[in-house]
Amino acid sequence: MMEALLPLFVVIPLGFAFITAVAGRYIPQFHRIAIPLVFLFLAGLSAWMMANIRENILLYMVGGWEPVNGIPIGIHLSADGLSVLLLVIINTLAFFSAFYSYAYIEQYTSGQYFYALFCLMVAGMNGVAVTGDIFNLYVFLEIAAIASYALVAFGTKKEELEASFKYQVLGGLGSLFILFGIGVLYWATGTLNMADMHKLLGSAPASPGIVFAGVLLLAGFGIKSAMVPFHSWLPDAHSSAPSPISAMLSGVLIKAIGIYCLFRFFFNLFAVSVQFAYGITTLGVISMLVGGFLAINQWDTKRLLAYSSISQMGYVVMSTGIGMILLCRGGDMKIAALAIFGGVYHLVNHAFFKGLLFLNAGALEYRLQTRDLLKMGGLAHAMPVTSATSLVASMAISGIPPFNGFFSKLIIIIAAVRAGFYGLAILAVIVSIITLAYYLKFQRYAFYGKPSESGLPEKDVPFSMKGTMILLALCCLLLSVLVFPSLRNLFLMPAVHALMNMTL
């Protein structure tokens, strides 16, 4: 019974967070070997669930508490196609980042605490994906967020502490909005169970209190996902964190505690509203444009990548928002499904190519001790694996065939055209050209320009870092096959159906 496996995604990383903090003090290599294996197991388990869930919904009642007279009185864990897809992304990227950290973490002291915080962050994100209770979603969200605050400041340098403080202030503000929104919903419905709340809210026009809760939640999750104008914390936090954590923050965290929650609430909890649909789409378009234009002027590699994340998440939100608008208007369901599919597909693709790019930036910083593109150059021969995998990721995120980013962007543009949003389709193409421009700049100044005065490194990065980058580069190519109907229907369409079937 697959539903009995759901608690493992929270219990295992949570347990290993405490085991690692203790055992790592007495067994020097314990955390560096055990934690990647833990996440490899969870990634395999989530992939098996995704291959078998189809359009079913898994429900696990914690403590065996059955509903009484149809009223849920216990805590429920639940998962559908979207939840399981998120579990695959979280745990797969966690495995890659943990394996990459085997050599990378040698720069820092107290590696066991790094891995303990890493496990806490993943446990929180997994909990957000599988919880069926709105308050426990907030609890898991805070577990992930607090662990990420500590990880951003892990190096304890002035820049890192300042970035972590800014992240905590704005993250705390987002959490406050979310908690207030949950409080208003609880006041209006008298329940915290998400399925029960959806049933009580029904399809009737929302009351002013429910609209107010929706605005609070949109602002709160907008901050967590770094949508413009709530994005100011992201460039500092993502550039200051250790590179494996930057990969998790951009590749997974903003999706798990931001984008996923946004979609879950506004598709499956509230009655779908045209006003909110246009508001979400507008946020996506603005983020796509502003993030792209801000990335052009960056010379710090990780800040460039951070602004790029804002832009790419804009694609995801814009496309899914178009699907939401069509659902509200009673438009063509096939086009709505295409738009939502494009958003979900790009969300998956972004996790892998952006995770790879942050690991590439980490490899450059590991060897050169700088993130300034103007202090780099001529590294293609000195660091061939880093150079080749960075080129693959840059082409993928810019939408160059045959890499995965091309197909998801193409689907988003086609969906916008077929839905009648011709202006948005043109903007998507323009931003993709801008994306290609700043990633060509990244390639030129880092790998193909004139070598810097400080000289070239003697060799590439250690095996664990190279191996991780090679595997992620292969994923950027292999994920292109998800555009084929048989694989698309098996892995991605259950997530699309979970969003479109608003009665689940």
Image (spheres, rainbow, N blue to C red):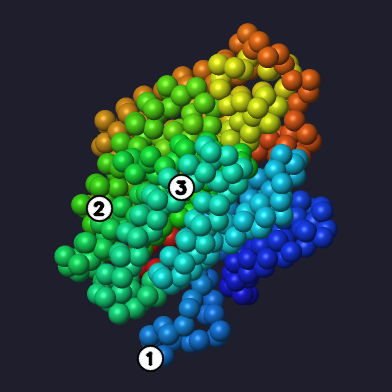
Q: In the displayed orientation, state which residue is furthest to the top.
A: 450
Position in image of residue 319 (x %, y %): 36, 42
Name the kind of residue labelled 1 in the image.
Asn
Q: Does dot 1 land on a helix, a strand or a loop?
A: loop
Question: In front here: 223 or 483?
Answer: 223
- Work out whether mark 1 precedes mark 2 in sequence or the reverse, and give the earlier one: 1
Above or below, 222 against 377 in this view is below
Measure the alpha-carbon separation of dots 3 and 2: 31 Å
Please report the residue visible at 66 percent of the width from the left and 52 percent of the height from the top: 114
Is 315 positioned to the left or the right of 385 in the image? left
Please report the residue visible at 53 percent of the width from the left and 38 percent of the height from the top: 158
- Work out whether mark 1 precedes mark 3 in sequence or the reverse, and give the earlier one: 1
The quarter of the image holding the C terminus is bottom left
The residue to which callout 1 is attached is 69
Is 243 positioned to the left or the right of 342 in the image? right
Measure the alpha-carbon separation of dots 1 and 3: 47 Å
Is 158 positioned to the left or the right of 501 in the image? right
Above or below, 381 against 87 in this view is above
Measure the alpha-carbon separation of dots 1 and 2: 34 Å
Q: Does dot 2 land on a helix, a strand or a loop?
A: helix
Please report the residue visible at 47 percent of the width from the left and 50 percent of the height from the top: 255
The residue to which callout 2 is attached is 276
1 and 3 marks in contact (CB < 8 Å): no
The residue to which callout 3 is attached is 165
Name the kind of residue labelled 2 in the image.
Phe
Q: Quadrant of residue 44?
A: bottom right
Is 190 positioned to the left or the right of 260 in the image? left
